[in-house]
Each structure stands twice: as C-alpha cells, then as structure tokens.
C-alpha cells in the first residue's frame, strides 16, 4: 500500500467514526459506568456538536466524507466540493446535538 492509500483509508476510517463510532463509544461508556449515563450522553452530544461544527468550518476532510456517507455517496477525501454540503446539515445537525447535550446537562444538574 502506498502512503496515499493509507492516508485515504485513515480519513475514511475517521469519517466512519464521526458518523457511527462516537455513538458506539458513548454506549460502551454508559455500559461501563451506568451511574453516569446522563453525564456521558450530555458530554457525547456536546463533543459531537463541537467536533462537527469546527470540522465543517475548518474544512476537515473526514467531516466532508462523513457528510458524503450521510448522503449515500462514495467517500472521496481527495475530491472535496464543500458547496455540495447543505448549510442546513452543516449547521443544523451540530445545533440540534448541542441543544440536546445542554438539555441533558440541565436535567442532570436539576435532578
């Protein structure tokens, strides 16, 4: 394998982690520490929202590939066209997860 293929595979793996892996990691943490479930879910949602927003603003390749996966397209880390990403997805999804994470945090603090 060439260095370019290895780098491409790393970007795609990170895109899959951004799309699915963080949920699995969060659920594993909940399984290990069920008494901290609300904190873990809150932190996971907030971390995902910040990661997604900062990644979109900084034009990280794995974020673009993650959006391609969401749109059921082949991932092309070396052919990036940011204009194809809907602004409602780029800003809306992180905003929803940020609000959800903050709501969970408030509920955890109040209860």
Image (cartoon, rainbow, N blue to C red):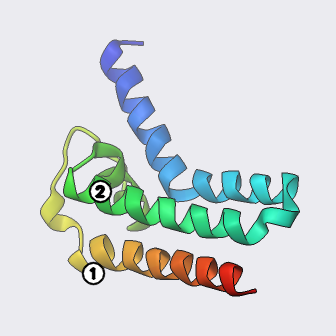
* Res 43 label: none
The image shows residue 40 at horizontal and vertical percentages of 69, 62
Q: In the image, which is nearer the foreground, mark 2 or mark 1?
A: 2
Q: Is residue 91 left or right of residue 98?
A: left
**Can the viewer see residue 72 in this picture?**
no
Measured as percent of width and height from the top left, residue 60 is found at 27, 46
State the separation of the CA atoms marked 2 and 1: 15 Å
In the picture, measured across the screen, residue 105 lies left or right of residue 31, that is left
Task: Give the residue number, with chain letter if any, for mark 1.
Answer: 88
Q: Which of the 4 quarters of the picture holds residue 10?
A: top left
Q: Which residue is mark 2?
A: 54
Name of the residue lying farthest toward the top? 2
Decide: few, some or many residues near mark 1? Use Cα within 10 Å; few <14, some 14-19, many ≥20: few
Instruction: Tell me: residue 83, above or below residue 2.
Output: below
Give the residue displayed 19% in from the left and 44% down from the top: 79
Residue drawn where x is 61% and y is 76% of the image: 105
Is 44 above or below relative to 91?
Answer: above
Please name whichever residue, 105 or 47, is drawn nearer the observer in this view of the structure. 105
Q: Position of residue 85 (x, y in %)?
A: 23, 67
* 3 over 80 or under it: above or below: above
């Amino acid at each position: 394998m060439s260095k370019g293929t290895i780098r491409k595979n790393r970007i795609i793996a990170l895109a899959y982690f951004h799309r699915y892996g963080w949920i699995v990691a969060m659920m594993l943490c909940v399984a290990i520490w069920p008494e901290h479930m609300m904190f873990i879910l809150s932190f996971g949602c907030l971390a995902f929202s910040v990661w997604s927003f900062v990644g979109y603003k900084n034009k990280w390749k794995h974020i673009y590939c993650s959006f391609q996966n969401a749109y059921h397209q082949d991932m092309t880390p070396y052919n990036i066209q940011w204009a194809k990403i809907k602004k409602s997805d780029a800003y809306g999804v992180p905003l929803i997860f940020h609000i959800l994470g903050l709501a969970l945090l408030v509920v955890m603090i109040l209860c």
